[in-house]
Amino acid sequence: MQDLINENFIQIDYFRLLLGSLLLIIQILLISSLYKSYSSSYNNKNKFSKNLIPFGISILIIVTVIKSSLALSLGLIGALSIIRFRTAIKDPEEIIILLMIMGCAVSIAAERELVGVLLIIVYLISYFLINKQNMTNSSSSYDVSIIVDLNKSQRLNDLIFNEFNSKLVFFSKGSGESLNLLYKVYDKKNLESIIAYFDQLQVKYTIETSLNED
């Protein structure tokens, strides 16, 4: 019994772990804020960002528990080997963000908080400068988001593979019988042409456009 108490309550500095958790949350919020403000990703940024804190905390807990036990480390490898992640992360920027958060969590769990803080400062500054420069150099463009209500007689090829296919940057099947399309165009005439095309198809759709200025 005494060995069990010693193993669970003495080896871990719970006060330091609590402060580390708060530090990790602050780091994640900074990363998330910069990502939502300057990222060029077309994925749902809010949906992705809301999972970052649980992800970081889970990594912190895992590393804190297994860092002093070889048996637990091997057990974790066996457990992860049977897990299947069916949703692949295709955006390199999102993968980098997950790796950064994982690095912050590991540095805190290893009681190397200063290393994580210094590296996250370098990352945030470089991320801001690079994306700010990209936004400055890019020309004005329109983001065209279209949600189409599908029916049994509607051909998907007419909605996806058409003369505007080169401007289609993202599409997905929405909830129910709907199709979400996202176009990026650099000319207002192209914007009007896309709207006219969907009008000719005589489909029920909603459209939102936003102008990205220099």
Image: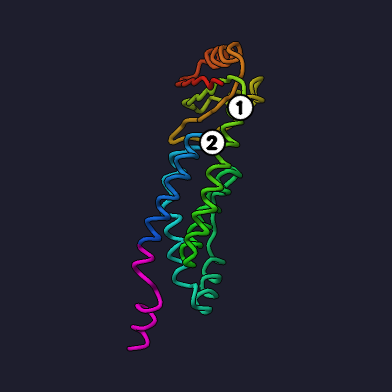
The quarter of the picture where residue 74 lies is bottom right
How many neighbours does mark 1 have within 10 angstroms: few (below 14), some (14-19), or many (20 or more)?
some
Q: Secondary structure at mark 1?
A: strand
- Which residue is labeled 2 in the image? 39
What's the residue at 40%, 55% (across, down)?
Answer: 23
How many neighbours does mark 2 have within 10 angstroms: few (below 14), some (14-19), or many (20 or more)?
many
The mark nearer the N terminus, 2 or 1, is: 2
Residue 95: percent from the left, percent from the top? 57, 48
- Which residue is labeled 1 in the image? 168
Residue 211: percent from the left, percent from the top? 51, 19
The quarter of the picture where residue 61 lies is bottom left
Residue 100: percent from the left, percent from the top? 54, 52
- Towards the viewer: 9 or 76: 9
- Towards the viewer: 99 or 15: 15
Asked if 146 appears above or below 109 in the picture, the reply is above
Disc 2, disc 1: CB below 8 Å?
A: no
* Magenta-drawn segment: 1-18
Amino acid found under the numbered disc labelled 1: Leu
What's the residue at 51%, 15% (across, down)?
Answer: 202
Residue 205: percent from the left, percent from the top? 46, 21
Asked if 7 appears above or below 188 in the picture, the reply is below
Magenta residue check for 113:
no
Distance Cα–Cα, label 2 vs label 1: 18 Å
Q: Secondary structure at mark 2?
A: loop
Quadrant where the N terminus sits is bottom left
